[in-house]
């Protein structure tokens, strides 16, 4: 599997000197794909941020973002990171048509091509030096090229290749993102530029033909990375140098170049002055958001009768912290059940999330996301978020809507499995199946049908046989997975799954230590011979189980709040039975947790918004060849897991 990293500053190009108040809302969890620029933010990203101000469903406020949603729906904003062409091969003019540059020539993102002057934009200084950032949700070796529009560019006309300067002002080659999971490099913005422009980015992978395209609207007016146009709606296009806008008052005195008025203008009072009066058009300057050392966003990711699951995400705008500590307030009567990504405790109505031992520092412009489960109502949501004692902006200003409840509301927090697995399941697979209960393993090193491996690179992850923890019998597979991509590890079963039949069923028991994080992780991988041996990955994101397709990063369910709510958390500290079924000829899939079908992990061949619409963005007819159990994290999540009583077959095996 190719490496996949999360990034903390989420979008196309990002300026290190990002001014305070630029991000009006942060996301608790982001739908996954390969990558995009951060600031100056791409159209898709800044519109996503503009629309995600509630922390729940998307509700754009900027007029250009509204128009994009009216044309193409909300999914392109949920998938702001996926403006790509799998057949791009680095091609530009002659491949992407004029007028379709911002969408990469795709129908899905056509709303980004709308010629308008009121897209959210980033203020920059022509000739200034900056550090550009490009996130690496899935890191690949490749080349980045940055172009800028020519002088005289008109944002109200469709963008064409002839509008861009013929040569990139920055070209950068890289194979591995830095330790924060992002690409970054120093640039000097082109000199002599004024007014509105577009910075056009092209990231061409060198390990495949996949190419990413992005438009970042910028204004060269002496700014230092401030974002304007978010959270606003205008009836007319903004001036060419935001954030300054002009308003022309009703004419009651002659303009400078007009002789004295002796006849009253229409709808105005007659003016009898004989000396021309100089009229100055009032200028209203947008007041920047007051500086805050941190910004916060509270999201309710799922809810049920008597409880809910949420996330508090905090961006550090101030100096680097070591250690860091986040606190927030729960309404009276609401009690914390558990939390993750920090040491989470409650005293009265105050919840404290202290930095964990494995991640004590928080650099400037980086964020942390604390997940938690609470008993009580999700309305009002947590408030008064603070970072090391400093009150963060953005938290508690707007209640976070509760996402759709599960189909069958749970009466207990998701830390308790909905059903109890059998206490004595078979230690060997049923007749007609293949698998293992690890009882025949002779030592701690994998042998027989299991092989330990780590794709791409090797780190701290280990796969061993453990005789102190087992679901049945006396042995299990223990996976110690680290937080870095290279700290991944898998144990692969030697059985060729194609010998099982067209419809594949699999079952495994898993016991894990840490709740599923906000970032994407993989626990089970099935290679697909019909997709270049790329993996179909089963793991989690946004604290709930998900499927992910490695080749194009499609997810099941979609990572919208509604989609995530249709999945389920994977309870910790006890054995959980997971079953899957894949009808490879029909291209359908199902998942059961402890014998109960998970509605969000149901792909029935008919695309449904928030569930399998993204999964069926192309024809899916897999030919699965191998099964691997392990841990792979793309956003710093660690876990210790045990697997036991693994079985594959041509009919449902059961728990």
Image (cartoon, helix red, strand yellow):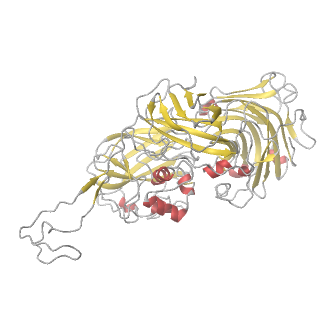
Residue 28 sits in quarter = top right
Closer-to-camera residue (3/27) = 27
The residue lying furthest to the right in this view is: 431
Residue 516: x and y, percent? 66, 37
Residue shown at 74%/53% (left/top)? 602
Query: On screen, 91 above or below 316?
Result: below
* Residue 521 visible from this viewpoint: yes
Q: Residue at the far front: name it.
A: 332
Q: Nearer the viewer, residue 407 or 98?
A: 407
Where, quadrant-wise, is the N terminus in this rendering?
Answer: top right
In the rendered view, tell whether residue 373 sits above or below residue 549: above
Q: Residue at x 21, y 60 (%)?
A: 281
In x, y percent, where is residue 246? 27, 59
Residue 85 is left or right of residue 284, and the answer is right
Q: Quadrant of residue 63?
A: bottom left
How many numbered circles are shown? 0
Q: Nearer the viewer, residue 328 or 497?
A: 328
Give residue 512's position: percent from left, percent from top. 72, 31
- Whole-percent x, y for residue 433 in the image: 89, 42
* Image: 418 above or below 468: below
- Which residue sits at x=84%, y=37%? 421
Tell me if I can see residue 554 in this picture.
Answer: no
Location of the C terminus by quadrant is top right
Q: Quadrant of residue 290?
A: top left
Q: In the rendered view, does 309 fall on the left or right side of 64?
A: right
Taking 270 as reference, is 144 left or right?
A: right
């Amino acid at each position: 599997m190719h490496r996949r990293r999360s990034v903390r500053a989420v979008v196309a190009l990002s300026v290190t000197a990002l001014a305070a108040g630029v991000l009006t809302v942060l996301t608790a969890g982001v739908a996954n794909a390969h990558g995009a620029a951060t600031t100056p933010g791409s159209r898709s990203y800044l519109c996503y941020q503009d629309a995600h101000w509630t922390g729940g469903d998307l509700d754009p406020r900027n007029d250009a973002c509204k128009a994009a949603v009216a044309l193409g729906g909300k999914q392109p904003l949920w998938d702001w990171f996926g403006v790509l062409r799998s057949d791009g091969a680095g091609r530009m003019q002659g491949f992407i048509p004029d007028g379709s540059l911002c969408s990469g020539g795709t129908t899905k993102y056509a709303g980004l091509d709308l010629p308008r002057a009121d897209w959210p934009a980033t203020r920059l200084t022509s000739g200034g030096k900056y550090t550009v950032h490009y996130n690496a949700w899935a890191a690949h070796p490749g080349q980045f090229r940055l172009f800028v529009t020519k002088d005289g560019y008109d944002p109200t006309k469709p963008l064409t290749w002839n509008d861009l300067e013929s040569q990139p002002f920055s070209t950068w080659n890289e194979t591995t993102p830095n330790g924060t999971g992002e690409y970054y490099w120093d640039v000097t913005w082109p000199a002599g530029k004024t007014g509105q422009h577009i910075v056009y980015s092209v990231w061409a992978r060198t390990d495949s033909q996949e190419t990413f395209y992005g438009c970042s609207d910028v204004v060269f007016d002496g700014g230092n990375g401030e974002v304007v146009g978010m959270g606003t709606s205008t009836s007319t296009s903004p001036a060419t140098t935001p954030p300054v806008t002009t308003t022309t008052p009703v004419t009651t005195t002659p303009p400078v170049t007009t002789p004295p008025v002796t006849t009253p203008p229409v709808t105005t009072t007659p003016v009898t002055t004989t000396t021309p009066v100089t009229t100055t058009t009032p200028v209203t300057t947008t007041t920047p958001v007051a500086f805050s050392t941190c910004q916060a966003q509270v999201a309710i990711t799922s809810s049920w009768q008597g409880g809910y699951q949420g996330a508090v995400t905090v961006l550090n705008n101030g100096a680097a912290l070591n250690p860091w500590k986040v606190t927030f307030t729960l309404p009276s009567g609401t009690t914390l059940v558990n939390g993750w990504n920090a040491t989470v405790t409650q005293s009265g109505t105050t919840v404290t999330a202290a930095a964990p031992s494995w991640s004590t520092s928080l650099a400037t412009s980086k964020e942390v996301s604390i997940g938690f489960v609470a008993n009580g109502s999700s309305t009002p949501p947590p408030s008064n978020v603070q970072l090391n004692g400093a009150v963060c902006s953005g938290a508690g200003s707007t209640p976070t809507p509760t996402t759709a409840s599960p189909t069958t509301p749970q009466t207990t927090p998701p830390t308790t499995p909905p059903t109890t697995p059998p206490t004595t399941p078979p230690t060997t697979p049923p007749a007609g199946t293949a698998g293992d209960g690890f009882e025949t393993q002779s030592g701690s090193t994998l042998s027989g049908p299991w092989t330990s491996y780590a794709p791409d690179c090797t780190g701290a992850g280990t796969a061993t046989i453990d005789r102190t923890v087992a679901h049945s019998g006396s042995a299990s597979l223990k996976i110690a997975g680290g937080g870095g991509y290279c700290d991944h590890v898998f144990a692969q079963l030697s059985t060729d799954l194609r010998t099982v039949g067209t419809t594949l069923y699999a079952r495994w028991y898993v016991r894990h230590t840490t709740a599923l994080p906000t970032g994407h992780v993989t626990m089970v991988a099935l290679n697909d011979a019909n997709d270049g041996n790329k993996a179909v990955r089963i793991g989690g994101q946004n604290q709930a189980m998900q499927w992910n397709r490695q080749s194009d990063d499609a997810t099941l369910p979609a990572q919208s709040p509604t989609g995530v709510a249709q999945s389920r958390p994977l309870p910790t500290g006890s054995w959980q039975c997971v079953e899957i079924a894949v009808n490879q000829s029909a291209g359908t899939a199902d998942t059961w947790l402890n014998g109960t079908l998970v509605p969000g992990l149901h792909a029935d061949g008919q695309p449904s918004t928030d569930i399998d619409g993204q999964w069926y963005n192309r024809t899916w007819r897999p030919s699965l060849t191998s099964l691997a159990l392990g841990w792979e994290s793309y956003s710093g999540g660690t876990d210790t897991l045990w697997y036991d009583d693994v079985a594959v077959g041509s009919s449902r095996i059961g728990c």
